[in-house]
Image (tube, rainbow, N blue to C red):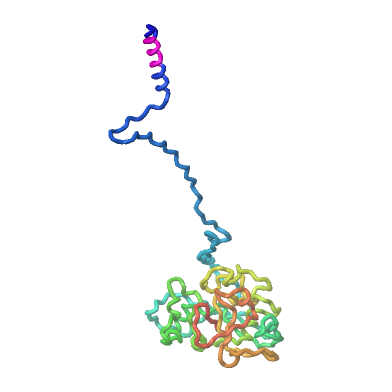
Amino acid sequence: MHKGMPVLLVLLTALVLMLAGCGPAATPTPAGGPPTQPPTPKLPEAATVARPQPTSELIGGATAVLGATVEPTPTPRPLPTRPPTATPIPATATQAPAPTATEIPPTATVPAPTGPVEAPMVEIPAGEFLFGSDEQPEASPPQKVNLPAFYMDVYEVTNAQFAAFVAATGYKTTAEQAGEPSWRDYFGQGKEDHPVVKVSWYDAEAYCKWAGKRLPTEQEWEKAARGTDGRRYPWGNDFDPEKLNGMEAGYRRTLPVGSLPAGASPYGVMDMAGNVAEWTADWYQAYPGSTYRDQYMGEKFRITRGGGWFSDKEQVQTFFRNSTAPEAANDDLGFRCAR
C-alpha cells in the first residue's frame, strides 16, 4: 500500500463525518421500537372575535328588543295643584258654603247632619240654546230648545258629601247590596273632595232627593255645559287636554272637584268634561224628529253625560250622549244635582 493511503483514508473519513453532521439529529430509538418523530409544533388558535350582543333602544317611548316592541307601563300624570278658590260664580248665582271635607273610614259612623249637605249651585238663566249635533247619530238632529231657569251644582258630588248622606240615612248602595266593590273602596285618605264613584242611578237619585234636589235632565245638563253659543267643549271649540281630566290628560284617576278651573262652562260649572261621567234623569230615547233607532233605546238605559277620566276627546264633547243600565256602578261614573 502506498504510504499516502492512510492519510487519504483519514481525510475521506473526516469528510463523511462532516457531511453527516449537516442533517437533523436522529432521536435515539427506544429499545425495541421505531424512531420517535419530533412533535408537530402546535399552531396558534384563531383569535375569537367578540360579537356584540343585542341591546335595547328606546324608540318613541317603547323598548324595542330584537324587533319586538314592548309598550312601557304608563306613568300617571302628577296631580295638579288645586287653586285655593274656585272660579268666581257669576253674579246671578246663589252660592252656599261648601261642606267641610272630613275623612270617614268605611266602618265609621258620624253624627247625622242637622240638614242636607249644602253645596254651591249656580243659576242657569231661562232661554234658548242649541241642543244636539249632527256629528253623533244618537244626538241628531240639532235643534233649538227653550228652557226655564234652573240651578245646577257647581261641583260633582264628593265622597265626603255622600258619606254624610250614608251616615244620616244608613243607605246601602246598589253595589254594596250586591256584594261588589262600592264607593267605600274609593274613599280613602285624601279623597274626601274627589267625586264619589261606584254609585248607580238609583243611588244618585236617592242622594239628590235627600239633599232636597234632583238629577238634571239631559237638556239641562247640556245647556249648563254648553251655554248658548253651541260650543263643542265647556271652555270653547278647541280641545285642550290641560283643561280637563280625560284620557289625553294622562291623570288616569279622579281629581278633586274643581281642580281645573280653566275648563269651567260659561256659567262657571266645573268638570263638565272629564273627571267622572254624570247620571242624568232621562232614559235613552231618540230626539224629537230623529230617524235614528237603537236596540237599547226605550226605558232600559239612562243617559250619562260629560265623560270621565278614561274618556277620549270625542266622548267629552258637550253634545255627546252615552247611556248605561241604571244599576251600573263604575269607577269613572258619578253625578251632580240640579234644582
Is residue 183 or residue 287 the one in the foreground?
Answer: 287
In this picture, is 103 found above or below 293?
above
Q: Residue at x 37, y 29 (%)?
A: 26
Q: Main secondary structure of the magenta part?
A: helix
In this picture, is 238 found above or below 19?
below
| Residue 25 seen anywhere in this rendered image of the structure | yes
Instruction: Kindly give the residue lying farthest to the bottom in the view shown.
Output: 299
Q: Quadrant of the C terminus?
A: bottom right
- Where is residue 273, by image quadrant? bottom right
Q: Residue at x 49, y 74 (%)?
A: 193
Residue 143 horizontal/vertical position (percent): 71, 86
Is residue 37 or residue 57 the one in the foreground?
Answer: 37
Residue 177 horizontal/vertical position (percent): 42, 87
Instruction: Kindly give the residue lying farthest to the top in the view shown.
Output: 3
Instruction: Kindly give the residue lying farthest to the left in the view shown.
Output: 31
Q: Assess whether residue 88 is covered by the magenta stretch.
A: no
Q: How many marks?
A: 0
Q: Residue at x 52, y 87 (%)?
A: 201
Is residue 27 or residue 84 the one in the foreground?
Answer: 27
Residue 183 horizontal/vertical position (percent): 45, 80
Q: Assess whether residue 12 is covered by the magenta stretch.
A: yes
| Residue 90 seen anywhere in this rendered image of the structure | no
Q: Quadrant of the N terminus?
A: top left
In this picture, is 8 found above or below 95?
above
| Residues shaded magenta | 5-14
